[in-house]
Image: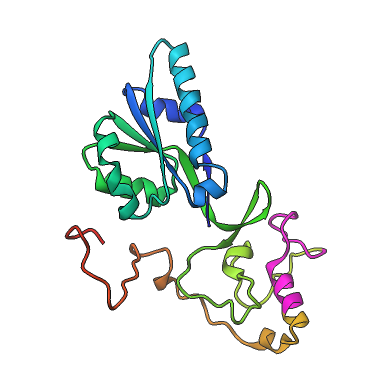
Amino acid sequence: MIVAERKPLDQILAMLEPYRRVLLVGCGTCTAVCLAGGEREVALLAAALRLARQARGQPLETAEVTVQRQCDREFVSPLAAPVAEADAVCSTACGCGVQLLAEVFPDRRVFPALDTRFMGVTVEPGWWAERCRGCGECILDRTGGICPVARCSKGLMNGPCGGYRDGKCEVDPQVDCAWLLIYERLKALGRLDAMGTYNPPKDWSVAFVGKPRRVVREDAKPPVVEGKV
């Protein structure tokens, strides 16, 4: 799940200041689950924006719609009519959804209402934690299902540093040492021998640096719009 948080209201107001009619588009998947951008959050944001603009003597008209996924053209394209009626669009999706909206509707400014944080899991209600950085080369088979790239503050690939204390990370004492978690998991599985396996330096050429990444199945059709992959 992609985890995001809403931007401060003043930042959103500043982005939308020149516009009188704004369409707020929510996402029914990731940002809905993390309580940042679903139908309920869109309604609350719209009300807050209208009240703030009214207090400034700059009335704002809002329309609200939530689609199942903003990262999928199939769900975004049907928004053509409400987008055409708006002066601008404000998205409560992750950065992927914002960009796809802007790509599908190039004649409208599309603004982000959220800051995208990370890919994570729900730990407790209202509490999410990072678990994956999309590094492009998964080694969870060697580390007991615990990712050192995302969960070790230093991204160490072959065991802990010398700074952890009482099972906690020296960078943030509230965070468990990832490699101690890996050790305990492998021990419980009877696979401590995996700790002796050398993990070579991370191949960052397949990760989130260098160039935009894509995945294309062999049986995939050409993109709908030429050059838009």
**Residue 222 figure quarter:** bottom left
Q: Residue at x 73, y 86 (%)?
A: 192
Residue 115: percent from the left, percent from the top? 48, 43
Q: Residue at x 46, y 28 (%)?
A: 46
Left or right of 32 on screen, residue 101: left
Residue at image position (31%, 24%) is: 19
Relative to 204, residue 53 above or below: above
Residue at 48% across / 68% down in the picture? 135
Image height of 145 relative to 39, above or below:
below
Q: Is residue 227 above or below residue 202?
A: above
Left or right: 199, with 39 as reference point:
right
Residue 112 place in picture, x, y as percent? 41, 39
Q: Who is closer to the viewer here, 90 or 61? A: 61
Measured as percent of width and height from the top left, residue 18 is found at: 32, 22
The magenta-colored residue range is: 166-185
Where the C terminus falls, by quadrant? bottom left
Magenta-span inclusion, residue 214 = no
Residue 169 magenta:
yes
Residue with the most extreme left position: 226
Asked which colour scheme the image uses, the reply is rainbow
| Front-most of residues 128 and 44 | 44
Seen from this angle, which residue lies furthest right? Answer: 166
Count the marks.
Answer: 0
Q: Residue 156, how many percent across, how many down?
A: 61, 71
Q: Which is the main secondary structure of the residues drawn in magenta? A: loop
